[in-house]
Image (cartoon, rainbow, N blue to C red):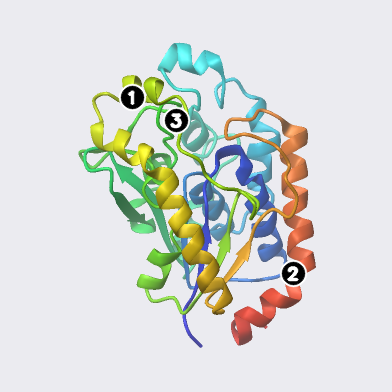
Amino acid sequence: MGKIGLVVEGGGMKCAYSAGILDCFLENNISFDYSIGVSAGSANISSFLANQKERNLRFYTQHVKDSEYISVQNFLLHGEIFGLDYIYGKLSNSTGKDPLDFQAIIDNPCEFEMVATDSKTGKAVYFNKGDLRQDNYTPIMASSALPVFCNPVSFLGCEYFDGGISDAIPFQRALKQGCEKVVVLLSKPRSFVRKPEAHKSVYSKVLRNYPKIIKAIDRRYIMYRNQIAKLKRLEAEGKLFVFAPSKNIKLNTIAMDPVGEQSLYDLGLDDYKSREEKLLKFLGSKNK
């Protein structure tokens, strides 16, 4: 049986959808040989690999109410909307309110990579779970550092921003890493078409010390459209199995709406159920 991979796209608070599907995977003992996440997708995978069902849901529907998680107050105090140190430190550490089971991730045989963007080059960098440490989830933070909304994250002497601006849907990385089949969890409906980024004058000013990041953001819509086009071709060839929200529940990347988040999570549950038989056929003998 060939190597099977899992790709989870980022999208901030829209990733409650993939959290629902991942919990269905846990409930039905569906596993993978390789996984790669982008931004909030990296965080979702970490709970999945730790076998912590509904942990992701709590971050979208309960912890999101905490001002240290996401707020204007964060921006005024720390210069960023999302409190990455709070989310991946204070909440997730072994002594935190909702600890991540680090040892379970390490013991899980599934490979795990996280995409971040090098602040100097604007190119994708791929961390793996060997870069994680108990109570130090900096690679996940780096993968999630959305430009303008977050400060860059320092790791091993370099600074990083969100992986979504350099490799938004890294199925090609999964194939390069030896996967014969890949399950892809998107955070946006199939009808979504990424447009050129708005507010260029704002992000160009805020990121003036990071010219390669500005360029990457400028070209993000082209990269994304190209990835979607290739994704559709590979899906038609039977190499990819793609989940995307079957309904357009309108929530933005920094939404603070627990009711909407629950709706997205529930949509993930429903979409899984409606496609479970086809998924199991795609996966073959590995998950029977």
Up/down of 285 relative to 262, above or below? below
Which residue is pictured at 25% across the width and 30% down the height?
Answer: 210
Q: Which residue is mark 1?
A: 204
53 lies above or below 27: above
Q: Quadrant of the C terminus?
A: bottom right
Measured as percent of width and height from the top left, residue 160 is found at 31, 39
**Amino acid bearing label 1:** Ser
Q: List x then y, in percent, for residue 81.
A: 50, 23
78 relative position to 73: left or right: left
* Horizontal arrangement in the rendering, residue 232 relative to residue 136 (left or right): right
Kind of residue at disc 2 = Arg
Disc with the residue nearer the chain's start (1 vs 2): 1
Q: Which residue is mark 3?
A: 85
Residue 211, given in percent of the width and then of the height, sits at 24, 32
Name the mark on residue 115.
none
Q: Crowdedness of circle 2 by 10 Å Cα count: few (<14), some, many (20+)?
A: few
Which residue in the structure is indicated by mark 2?
275
Work out whether residue 88 or residue 72 is closer to the camera in this orientation and state it. Answer: 72
